[in-house]
Image (cartoon, rainbow, N blue to C red):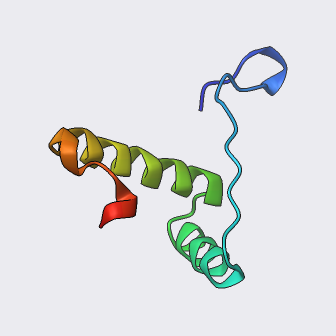
Amino acid sequence: MRLKMGGKTDLERVVAYIPAERKRELEEWAQTDERSVSWLVAKLIDKALQERRQQPSNSKSLLHQ
């Protein structure tokens, strides 16, 4: 995490609404890995974006899978 003086981060915030069961699953996963849910979700987003960048441009939409 990139922190500024006073403990503030220079990272942007993203909010998502998910079903309670998915949240519980993420919490369990994060706890198993001794990480926060925020860290885990950020890593999942990073991985998805990396995979998306490697796809041909005409097949980059999650909505069409």
Vertical relation: 48 (above or below) 18: above
Q: Residue at x 79, y 14 (%)?
A: 5
Q: Which of 7 and 48 is in front in this view?
A: 48
Location of residue 2 in the rendering, given as x and y in whole percent from the top left corner: 61, 25
How many discs mark residues in the rendered view?
Answer: 0
- Identify the image quadrant of residue 54: top left
Residue found at the far bottom of this picture = 21
Query: From this viewpoint, which residue is outermost toward the top?
Result: 5
Q: Nearer the viewer, residue 51 or 38?
A: 51
Q: Which residue is drawn at 35% across and 49% down?
A: 47
Look at the picture and state if 19 lies above or below 11: below
Percent of width and height locating residue 46 = 41, 44
Q: Is 54 left or right of 33, judged from the image as shown?
A: left
Give x and y (percent) for residue 16: 68, 57
Position in image of residue 3 (x %, y %)? 68, 23
Residue 13 against residue 63 in the figure, above or below: above
User: Is there any visible trace of residue 36 in the rendered image?
Assistant: no
Residue name at image x 57 percent, y 67 percent:
30
| Residue farthest to the left, as pictured | 56
Q: Can residue 34 be seen in this view?
A: yes
- Outermost residue to the right: 6
The N terminus is located in which quarter? Answer: top right
Q: Quadrant of the C terminus?
A: bottom left
Q: Looking at the image, which residue is at 63% across and 53% down? A: 38
The quarter of the picture where residue 17 lies is bottom right
